[in-house]
Amino acid sequence: MEYHRIAFTLLAMKKISLGLLVIWSLGCFVLPGCQKQVDAAATIEQMMKFCSDLKQISFAGQFNLVGASHFAAFNGLNDLDVDASGKVDLTNANNFKYSANLNVSGKSAEGSTRIGAEVRSLPDYNYFKVTDISVPLGLPFSLAADDKWYKIKKSALAEENTLGGNAKSLNDNEIAKIRNLIASANLFVTTQILPEEVVNNFTSYHFEAKINPAGLGSFLENLTAITHDKTTINIPYLVKLAESSSYDLWITKKNFGLVKLKITSLNNNEADLPNFKLELNLSQFNSPVEVKLPAAVTSDFSLEKFFGISLNNL
């Protein structure tokens, strides 16, 4: 009898132990306090280092602006929607190459406007062709979607618009300093750690974040100091805009690349700040990028004539 009681007791203890083990195991997967938490700050720090060393990248994204546009090229257009995709080669930062497909739509007092274009940028010229266009009668657009390529010379003297003229060149030392500045930048403060996701075929961490205004201000001040008079930055305005926005960051677990970025800026009470949403997907990190010269190109073209307005502030 005593033997059976002991055996029963041992069996009961075994069942209880197994039950506790199961509960503990489930808790470690379900309860946030039990599972291993990623160090968000360290992950974002590694992401900034990864970004600082990027040479090539592909992108695809959408930009949605609510209300009036502050861009000179789209003066008078409201509720802009921009879809863009392309690839960039930053191996030579002074003569970087890129190709992009752009589709822009918006509304104005005259009606709806839609413009599509393919753009290629090579060391000496920017090339573009209009792939789609629909504008209200009377607006000053002189091109059609006729599959013709136009070129705009990159020259320090071509100051009539930013798309045609180069920014003042940076030397190798300045470029190295900028890369180091990006690597050490402290721009984000994590507000929430969300479940991991597979984004663009990468298993990725997902963080909600806000901007670190002190870190961004310091970054922009140092950037201005490095480039001297080669860049013009309205630091207070950019910090104010960034501070009013929320951020979602998707960072790959494998190499800490920023594979997706989402920015939401809803400033209904700030007249000088735009309301917009931006979603950007990044891929093919440091993969070879080929930007080909178009086969047939017309002569140089003035974007000022195309838009019918001055593009000094584009």
Image: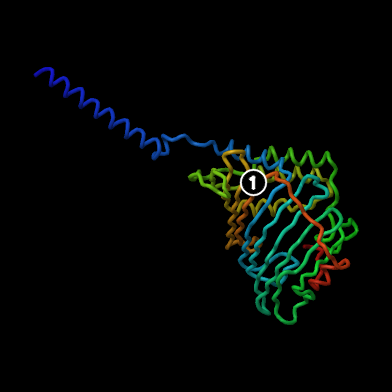
Q: In the figure, is residue 249 to the left or right of 305?
A: left
Q: Element type at marker 1?
A: helix
Image point 27% across, 27% down: which residue?
17
Q: Is residue 117 above or below residue 45?
A: below
Image point 49% across, 45% down: which residue?
194
Give whichever of 220, 111 is nearer the camera.
111
Q: Residue furthest front?
A: 295
The amino acid sitting under disc 1 is: Pro
The image position of residue 62, as x and y in percent, is 62, 60
Q: Residue furthest top?
A: 2
Q: Is residue 238 above or below residue 77?
A: above
Q: Is residue 24 above or below residue 72?
A: above
The image position of residue 224, as x and y in percent, is 78, 46
Residue at which label 1 appears: 213
Q: How many marks?
A: 1
Q: Is residue 82 above or below residue 25?
A: below
In which image quadrant can residue 292 be found?
bottom right
Quadrant including the C terminus:
bottom right
